[in-house]
Each structure stands twice: as structure tokens, then as C-alpha cells.
Amino acid sequence: MSRRVFNLYFVLLNLLLLSLMYSVNIEFGPLSIVFPSEFIVILMVPLVICHFVASEVTKVRLFHFYTFVLLFFLVSFLGIGFSNNPVVATKALFREVAYFAAVFIGLITFLPDRSYIYRAIELIIISGVGVGLLGIFQQLNSGFVLYGAHASPFFNEHGTFGVMMSYCLIYSLVMWRSTAKLTFLNGSLLKVSSTIFLLATFLSYSKAAWVSILVSVLLLAILWGMESDRDLSQKIPGLGALVVLPPVILSLAILAAGIRLDELAYYFSLEYSSNQERINRFAAAVNMAMENPFTGVGVRNYVFVYEDYKSIVFNTIHADSEGLTSHNMYLKILANRGFVAFGLFIQLLLVYILDSLNMIFSMGKRDRDLIIAGLVGNISYMVHWLANTLWVGRIEAVFWFSISITYLVYSQKLD
């Protein structure tokens, strides 16, 4: 492979990872683009495809995971003809495939060794600090009651912001503990960045992000506790601090709101009832899947047919509003793409998790830290899926990036 071609891809990859934090949505009539991240993806895809077909196709390991992803996309494309709005479905699928090709296939075929992954993770952490500080600043200015603070204008809602900060927190924690030497960040700076990401996540008031962080921290404690290179008794204080610190910081943030706690409490009350409304959206998604078991209603078509499948289990203040989302990624896949695509989606997630765990317990510490960072980051996202969808380009990129870590290490291990 030409060194010039590799350098071009790595430059574009770094620009993409940086732009994920600082992109904005631009409307072009009926179309929209997240700029500049999706513009960079458009540049990356032809480069990846040409390189893949021309020189590397025989070297790419056809992992079980890789096969399930291709089948998942194929089944999704076959369902376009049955979609309520095939134009929206086609555009959404092409966008999904573009992110997968640019990040996952690109990393697997281009990167010569995993040292470049450390540089990419470091870039994500550094760029994320700025967005995290912006979100915290917005909350400080609002008296800690700005529900849905999302580091505007770069994130259009608090859930996406919470997910991205969760990813950054996991990366920062694992790199802080890792023995790998980063270019710009040392242990002290990683402690600071971890604190920033933790505060930003909780001040986003994304409840799903809070739960995903707690699950991720406990998972990190388990994975680190099972290692044999350090005595477990030396780890207990640090692991305990990781479990206790999030609720402590959250409590302090809430206390800082003072007399305006009543305003904050409203957003978590039965009167506001966002959680009850989620049940209504879940029920509609199940109705769609049961009536369209093989193809679903079409990718991103949930919103267009919601009224036809609406099921009001709880009469909330949102019950008569448009069903913009199913509020559950798994049910969204089921409703939009049918049972076959749903089964493939669950299978590819399980294969990835099992492959990652197998690699974690069979690799040296340096590689193990990389895989743990990607796996736990993605599990935090998968937990978030239980209450939200948030399958949007900028997070898709980090999702595929985290998965590619496992298979990049695995591929180079075979070589």
C-alpha cells in the first residue's frame, strides 16, 4: 500500500473524529447534512472502496461479525421496496453504510498497527473536553436547571450529547489506567478529562446516560478486577471510588440548584411522564413489527406511520404528539426492518461482545486496554439504546470505530 494513500486516509480519519464533536446540522431543502463530518465521510468512502477492491480484498479477514453486518445491511436494503417512504429509507441506509465503510472497513484495511488507534482515541478525548466544558458552562449559566443542556450548537439534543460524553469518559478512564504512552495526555490530564466528562454527562440530565455510565463503571471494575497482574486488594479503593463518585457528583450538582429544585423535579415527575410515554412508543413499534414481520415499515419510517399503529397505554401529555422515535433502538430495528434484520442485528452484537471478551482474556495488557476501551464504550451505548435510539451519524462513527479496535487487533494477531 502506498504510504501516501495511508497518510491521506489517516488525515481524513483524524479530521472526521475531530469533526464529530464540532459538526452542525445544515438543511438543504428536503435533505440535510451534518457538516463537516459527513462531508469528510463522502471523501473517505471512495478511497476505502478503491483500496479495498484494488489491493486488500484478499487480506481482509471475513470475521463472523463482518458477515453478519453485511447480511444486516443487505436485508435492510431489500426492505426498501416495501417502505412507506423509500426515499428516506434509501438515504438513511446509504448514510449508515457510508459510516461503516469509512470507519470500520477503512481502519481494518488501512491501519498497519494499533499504535494509530491510541492517537485516534487521544484525539477523541482532547476534542471532547472542549464540548464537555461548553455543556458544563451552559449549565452553570442556567443555575443547573437547563434541562437538556447539550453543548449547543454542536449537539441538537441532550441524549446525543450524553452518549458522546459517555464514550469519552470510558476512553479517558481506560487510557488513564493504561500503560501506553500517549502523545499529549498524561495521567494527571486524563484524571482532569475524566472528571469533565463525568460532570458533563450528568449535567446533560440524560437519565439513560446516567444508567449507562453506572453499568460501564461496574463492568470496568469487573474486568479490571479479574486481571492477575496486580493484587486485587490494591485495586479496591480505586474501583470503589469509580462506583461512588458518579452519584456523589450528581447529588452535589442537584444541591447547587437550590430553590429551583422544583423546576428540575418536574422533568422527572409522573406529570411530565416521559418514561410512561416511552411505553406508548414501544407498543407502537411492536404493532408495526407484528403487522410487517419480514420487512418492517422501512428504515427511518417509524415517524411516517406512527399514527396508523399508535397505542396509548398511558395517557400522557405527549400521547397526542407525533411519534418521532420509538425510544428504543432494538424495537426501532424490529419495527423498521422486520424480524430477520432484527435477528441479524442482535447476532452481530453478540458476536462482537464474545469476540472482544475472548480477546481481552487472551491478549497482553497493552492490547487488552484497547479492546476494553472500545467494548465498554459500546456497551454504554447499547444500554442507552434501551431508552433511546440515537442512531445518528456522529455516534455511528464512534460505534464502528470502537468495534474496529477488536477486529484490528485480532487481524494483526493472526498475521
Image (cartoon, rainbow, N blue to C red):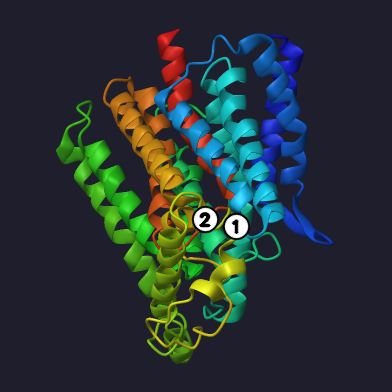
| Residue drawn 62% across the image and 38% down it | 97
Residue 366 versus residue 287 in the image, above or below: above
Which of these two is toward me, 44 or 340? 340
402 to the left or right of 2: left
Q: Amino acid at mark 1?
A: Arg
Q: Say few, some or many: other residues with alpha carbon within 10 Å of mark 1 (under 14 / 14 to 19 / 20 or more).
A: many
Element at label 2:
helix
What residue is shown at x 49% (from left), y 69% (from top)? 203
How many labels sit on residues? 2
Q: On residue 401, which mark appears?
A: none
Above or below for 335 versus 188: below
Label 2 packing within 10 angstroms: few (<14), some (14-19), many (20+): many
Instruction: Indicate whether 73 appears above or below 192.
Output: above
Q: Quadrant of the C terminus?
A: top left
At x 67%, y 32%, the residue is 13
Whole-percent x, y for residue 191 in the image: 45, 47
The foreground one among 313 and 148 is 313
Which secondary structure lies at badge 1?
loop
Q: Are marks 1 and 2 in contact (CB under 8 Å)?
A: yes
- Quadrant in the picture for the N terminus: top right
**Can you see residue 65?**
yes
Residue under label 2: 336
242 relative position to 281: left or right: left
Label 1 vs 2, first from the N-terminus: 1
Q: Is residue 125 visible?
A: no
Q: Which residue is denoted by mark 1 in the rendering?
A: 300
Instruction: Give the amino acid type for the residue marked by disc 2 in the picture.
Output: Asn
Spatial separation of the CA atoms under disc 1 and disc 2: 7 Å
Question: 7 or 119, which lies in front?
Answer: 7
Q: Where is residue 95 drawn, in percent x and y?
A: 67, 44
